[in-house]
Amino acid sequence: MNALPLSLAGASLLALGSGALWWRDQSLLCVSDLHFGKAERIARRGGATLPPYDTRDTLNRLSADLLRTNARTVICLGDSFDDLDAARGLPEEERLWITRLQAGRRWVWVEGNHDPGPIELGGMHMAELLHAPLTFRHIARDGASGEISGHYHPKASVRLGARSISRPAFLVDRNRIVMPAYGTFTGGLRCDAAPLTTLMHRDARAILTGTTPHQVPMPR
C-alpha cells in the first residue's frame, strides 16, 4: 500500500497516496471533498460542459481503497456533493454504486458547506463526528486539537531532480490534519496561501499524494 505513516493525538494513521486517510486500528477510512456531480453542476449553472465522468472516476478510486483496506467505517468529510441538487439528481447507476459500497459498513456523511442538508443516500448525516481521540469535521476550528478536516483542498509542490511537481496534499501538524480533496475535477489551494499559513503550526508538513507520496516541510 503506497502510504506514509503519521500520528495525531496518539492515533496511528496512514496517509494513502490516493488522498484517503486510513486508521487501521479502527478499520476506518476517511475521505474529504468528493464533490460528486461537479461536472453536472457546472453545466447546470451555465458553465463549461465537461465530460460527465467525474463521479464515476471518484467512485472507482474509492472502491479501490475500500477493496485494499476492507474498512468497516467510512467517513466522508463534507462537500461529498457539489450541491444538494447534485445529490438529488445523481444518476441511478451511481446511486446504486454508493449503496453497494455502503453495504455492511458504518457510513457517515459529515456536513459540508456545499451539502449542508441531509443526504438521502443511506448512512448517517452528522454535523461532525467525535471518534475519540479524534474529531472529524469539514472546516477546521481555531484552537482545536486532534482534529481532522477538509474544505481547503490543499496542494503543495516539491522539486524532484530537474522537475517540480504539484499535487493535492495532506497538511499535518501537532494539532490537526487538513485533508486533500479526493474528488475528480477538484481544484486546490496552495499551502503557502492564507488561511492555511495561519491555520497550521510552524512545524507543519505536507504529504503530497500520488503513486509515491512525498513528505516535505509545509511550504510557506
Image (tube, rainbow, N blue to C red):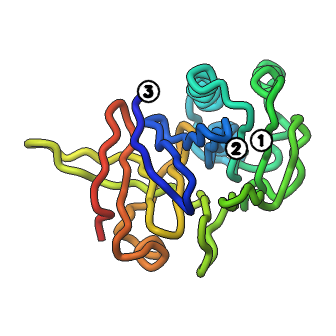
Q: Is residue 35 shown to the viewer in this render? A: yes
How far apart marks 2 and 3 lie (CA) works out to 34 Å
Three-letter code for the amino acid on which mark 3 is drawn: Met
From the image, which quarter does the C terminus lie in?
A: bottom left
Relative to 98, is 38 above or below?
below
Label 1 sits on what residue type? Ala
Taking depth in this image into account, of 28 and 47 the one nearest to the observer is 28
| Label 2, residues with CA under 10 Å away: few <14, some 14-19, many ≥20 | many
Q: What label sits on residue 1 in the rendered view?
A: 3
Residue under label 1: 86
Q: Are marks 2 and 1 in contact (CB under 8 Å)?
A: yes
2 or 3: mark nearer the eye? 3
Q: Secondary structure at mark 1?
A: helix
- Of residue 38 and residue 194, the one placed in the foreground of this image is 194
Q: How many marks?
A: 3
The x and y percentages for residue 165 are 25, 45
Image height of 202 relative to 127, above or below: below
Question: Between disc 2 and disc 3, whose residue precedes?
Answer: 3
C-alpha gap between disc 2 and disc 1: 6 Å
Circle 2 residue: 41
Q: Position of residue 104 (x, y in %)?
A: 83, 24
Residue at left offset 68%, top offset 51%:
77
* Amino acid bearing label 2: Arg
> Regarding mark 2 in the picture, which secondary structure is present there?
helix
Circle nearer the N terminus (1, 3): 3
* Cβ atoms at labels 2 and 3 below 8 Å apart: no
Residue 204 picture quarter: bottom left
Q: Position of residue 45 (x, y in %)?
A: 70, 49
Tell me: 167 left or right of 12: left
Calculate the distance from the C-alpha at mark 1 to the C-alpha at mark 3. 32 Å
Q: Is residue 152 at all visible to an observer of this figure?
A: no
